[in-house]
Image (cartoon, grey):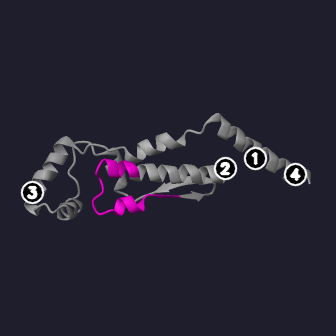
Amino acid sequence: MTIEEIMKEIGSKTVKDAKSILKEKNKINTGKLYNSINYVIENNKLVFKMLDYGQWVDKGRKPGKYVPVDALNKWLKQKGIDLKYSFVINRAIKRRGIKPTFFFTKAVEENINIDDKTLDKIAEGLIEKYFVKYIK
């Protein structure tokens, strides 16, 4: 198994698990965040990508600040909530924050650990590749 194959396996499993957690926690509104979760391999690095607001869904929001009004109003419309409640909801978010889901954090933590057998296979593949390349 090559490093790239392992990265692809970890990437696809992490994306699948993150999406599963979002579904399980009933955090799919329009599906835009759900559909944006993906991974790429850039310069031998596994890079996960999603819409920016995914960080707030994952980590939550600490009390102390209002959320952007336009973003809140857009969310309220999508949920079918009257905009007259915008200020009250924003004030509650400022006071209490938003509870984190850890949908992405949990998915990464569960999939990033590589066991010793897999590391041995990677090392064997690299050694074989190195020696075949440089002995010829």
Query: Which of the two residues, 97 or 38, is positioned nearer the viewer here?
Result: 38
Q: Quadrant of residue 114?
A: top right
Residue that mark 4 sits on: 134
Residue at horizontal 61%, vertical 36%?
115
Q: Quadrant of residue 67?
A: bottom left
Q: Which mark is residue 125?
A: 1
Q: Earlier in the sequence, mark 4 or mark 2?
A: 2
Q: Secondary structure at mark 4?
A: helix
Residue that mark 3 sits on: 85
Q: Which residues are magenta?
A: 20-39
3 displayed left or right of 63: right
Q: Earlier in the sequence, mark 1 or mark 4?
A: 1
Looking at the image, the residue that sits furthest to the left is: 84
Asked if disc 1 and disc 2 are in contact, CB closer than 8 Å, the reply is yes
Residue at horizontal 20%, vertical 59%?
72
Looking at the image, residue 98 lies above or below residue 73: above
Separation of disc 1 and disc 3 at Cα? Answer: 60 Å
Asked if disc 1 and disc 4 are in contact, CB closer than 8 Å, the reply is no
Looking at the image, residue 134 lies above or below residue 84: above
Residue that mark 2 sits on: 3
